[in-house]
Image (cartoon, rainbow, N blue to C red):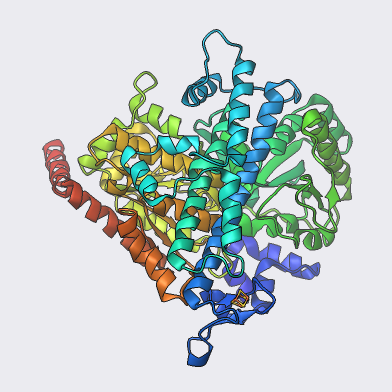
């Protein structure tokens, strides 16, 4: 077995890898192997190439070369690199949010007739948050005013982003005291890019504070706006059953795989694929139907709202093509590999780029026009159908697929626990206080070819739920756990500790809750805040027995997410690799100092997922102790024992 096979996630992948190689296609694991050894300076974050006096690198073993040509030391170089990662991630999430805001406005103004306001209750709530008069007004008028106010937040120059005041009061005061409340989304990204150019901010602490302000503009700004407006436009998710893994592809149907992050186009692709004329057209080409499946976060978006199956997570994008049955892979933005066009050339798949922001040589570009959204989507679906008769050679759909439940928005969790008329987090808080649930962990983020596909996610999540920690998930991590059967209610009795299993079985939920795409990490912030506001678990997010992790992260977006989690008071562990290890100052600041400055939240790095889970459990236990509920946990186990004895008697 070669390295590619070892890392690519199990037997289902092996025939696909073989057929890819037979067809002359390279896969991510092949290219990873060819990149070895990767640069040690880059891995540890000790190189700088932001001006042409460089590139410079700080060699820990060469005492004479401890400064870049401009005099920058390792702490500055490292903090600048980290801050730029945060800015990149924030820009990605927030520019997605800008596109959603523009389509939201166009829909409200009647300029994009194929979109409509689906969740009027959420629109009304949000409008009230923004101080908008709602009584006696038409839905679309409210939406226009809301959209215009939100659009201004991207370019806002002064003041505070609106959603900052959703955080617990104590957290808001910490941010205000440190001067890290974001003034406007774009402003923070631009200022970070400015402050990290040659010869500007050269104090790592100051750079990292600005990185924090930028990350907050993501979590409590761009990402939160995206989630809220997508819910209003496409519907707030509620639990829905579907299937996951490459086995969801269909031999007899036109397979269209949507991949990327924005649901704007994929929502319309779903509608177009159900259109009678399109279905007839597909039949005319010899297919029995049109099968839509997703990769990455676009997949998570349409899964949650339509139950559309998921073909796989980030590292499976090329494998999907190698099945030989994907007529079209439609990509929008983020996490799309350029190699897709090379792999597709070895099979019959057409890779279709649809965003004006993301072009890839060798693909078909059909630009999505939101003003005639459905027609654009039909054009794309028709291109896929036309490609169905072009299948040639061997096809191979792996047998693997698994049931899953997804769509646990913050609102749904609240309804499921408290009931429709008294929706609340009270039962969750009570079960944490009485010890059935030890704590809550957010396990999110990407895949990384440096570790075997999904292995870190699964090891960590299994360890957490076995220890009665309820796990909330987004992104590719959620897809990883879904493939392993952790996102079904039956997983509670199979994998969860006694206390957690008891709660899950009573409510009828899995021990691992799928809360959406990467931008939906904002739902985790809202859920954590709701736990604080419910009472009994302290008065800030940093008091809660919660922890966060991205055990296989790879994207700059993950760093932005981690930074806003930490700044919001959450202990957060990353695996695989850590980008500031060359700098003692920057690493110390992120791993220790931030805990003091931000009253609770710190980063940690632990590549071993078992040890990382243990760090999270230790943190949760320390919070339980501070809250004085550590004894309750012992008591409840005793109570359960007594009950069993009683039942036995
Ligand atoms: Fe080197 Fe300084 Fe230029 Fe960076 S900014 S490349 S450390 S000279
Ligand atoms: S898609 S950012 S690989 S989670 Fe959101 Fe997955 Fe990470 Fe992309």
Q: Residue at x 49, y 33 (%)?
A: 239
Count the marks: how many? Answer: 0
Residue 575: horizontal and vertical position, in percent?
46, 65
- In the figure, is residue 317 to the left or right of 238? right
Residue 352: horizontal and vertical position, in percent?
80, 48
Q: Residue at x 25, y 34 (%)?
A: 535
The quarter in which the C terminus is drawn is top left
- In the figure, is residue 369 to the left or right of 156? right
The quarter in which the N terminus is drawn is bottom right
Residue 466: horizontal and vertical position, in percent?
32, 53
User: Is residue 306 placed above or below 528 in the rendered structure?
Assistant: above
Q: Nearer the viewer, residue 275 or 228?
A: 228
Question: From where the camera sits, is residue 400 visible?
Answer: no
User: Is residue 31 placed above or below 345 in the rendered structure?
Assistant: below
Q: Nearer the viewer, residue 281 or 515?
A: 515
Residue 518: horizontal and vertical position, in percent?
55, 47
Q: Residue at x 69, y 72 (%)?
A: 31
Question: From where the camera sits, is residue 9 visible?
Answer: yes
Residue most extreme to the top = 136
Find residue 11 and report its image quarter.
Answer: bottom right
Q: Nearer the viewer, residue 462 or 36?
A: 36
């Amino acid at each position: 077995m070669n390295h590619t096979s070892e890392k690519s996630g199990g037997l289902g992948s092996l025939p696909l890898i073989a057929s890819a190689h037979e067809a002359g296609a390279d896969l991510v694991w092949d290219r990873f192997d060819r990149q070895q050894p990767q640069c040690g300076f880059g891995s540890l974050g000790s190189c700088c190439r932001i001006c042409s006096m460089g590139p410079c690198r700080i060699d820990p073993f060469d005492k004479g070369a401890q400064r870049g040509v401009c005099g920058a030391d390792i702490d500055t170089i490292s903090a600048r690199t980290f801050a730029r990662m945060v800015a990149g991630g924030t820009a990605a999430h927030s520019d997605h949010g800008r596109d959603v805001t523009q389509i939201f406005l166009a829909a409200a103004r009647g300029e994009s007739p194929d979109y409509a306001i689906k969740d009027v209750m959420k629109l009304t709530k949000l409008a009230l948050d923004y101080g908008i008069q709602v009584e006696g007004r038409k839905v679309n008028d409210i939406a226009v005013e809301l959209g215009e106010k939100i659009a201004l937040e991207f370019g806002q120059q002064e003041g505070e982003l609106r959603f900052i005041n959703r955080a617990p009061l104590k957290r808001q005061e910490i941010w205000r005291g440190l001067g890290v409340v974001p003034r406007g989304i774009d402003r923070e990204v631009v200022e970070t890019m400015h402050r990290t150019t040659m010869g500007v901010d050269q104090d790592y602490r100051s750079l990292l504070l600005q990185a924090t302000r930028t990350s907050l503009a993501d979590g409590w700004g761009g990402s939160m706006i995206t989630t809220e407006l997508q819910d209003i436009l496409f519907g707030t998710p509620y639990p829905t059953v579907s299937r996951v893994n490459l086995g969801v592809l269909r031999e007899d149907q036109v397979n269209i795989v949507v991949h990327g992050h924005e649901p704007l186009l994929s929502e319309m692709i779903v509608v177009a694929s159900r259109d009678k004329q399109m279905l007839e057209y597909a039949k005319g080409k010899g297919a029995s139907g049109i099968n839509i499946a997703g990769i990455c976060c676009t997949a998570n978006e349409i899964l949650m709202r339509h139950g559309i199956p998921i073909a796989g997570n980030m590292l499976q994008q090329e494998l999907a093509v190698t099945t030989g049955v994907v007529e079209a892979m439609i990509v929008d933005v983020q996490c799309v590999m350029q190699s897709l066009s090379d792999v597709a050339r070895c099979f019959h798949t057409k890779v279709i780029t649809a965003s004006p922001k993301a072009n890839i040589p060798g693909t078909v570009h059909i630009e999505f026009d939101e003003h005639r959204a459905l027609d654009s989507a039909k054009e794309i679906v028709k291109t896929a159908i036309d490609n169905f008769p072009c299948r040639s050679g061997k096809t191979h759909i792996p047998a693997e697929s698994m049931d899953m439940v997804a769509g646990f928005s913050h609102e749904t969790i609240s309804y499921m626990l408290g009931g429709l008329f008294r929706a609340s987090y009270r039962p969750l808080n009570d079960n944490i206080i009485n010890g059935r649930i030890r704590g809550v962990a957010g396990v999110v983020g990407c895949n990384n070819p440096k570790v075997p596909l999904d292995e870190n996610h699964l090891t960590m999540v299994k360890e957490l739920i076995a220890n009665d920690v309820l796990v909330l998930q987004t992104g590719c991590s959620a897809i990883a756990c879904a493939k392993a059967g952790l996102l079904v209610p039956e997983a509670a009795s199979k994998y969860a500790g006694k206390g957690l299993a008891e709660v899950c079985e009573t409510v009828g939920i899995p021990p691992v809750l799928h809360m959406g795409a990467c931008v939906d990490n904002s739902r985790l912030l809202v859920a954590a805040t709701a736990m604080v506001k419910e009472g009994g678990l302290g008065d800030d997010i940093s008091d809660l027995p919660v922890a966060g992790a991205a055990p296989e992260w790879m994207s700059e977006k993950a760093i932005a997410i981690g930074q806003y989690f930490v700044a919001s008071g959450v202990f957060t562990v990353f695996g695989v690799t850590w980008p500031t290890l060359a700098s003692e100052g920057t690493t110390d600041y992120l791993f220790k100092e931030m805990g003091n400055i931000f009253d609770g939240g710190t980063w940690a790095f632990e590549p071993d997922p078992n040890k990382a889970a243990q760090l999270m459990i230790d943190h949760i236990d320390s919070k339980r102790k501070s809250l004085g509920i550590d004894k309750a946990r012992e008591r409840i186990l005793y109570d359960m024992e007594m009950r069993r004895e009683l039942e036995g008697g």
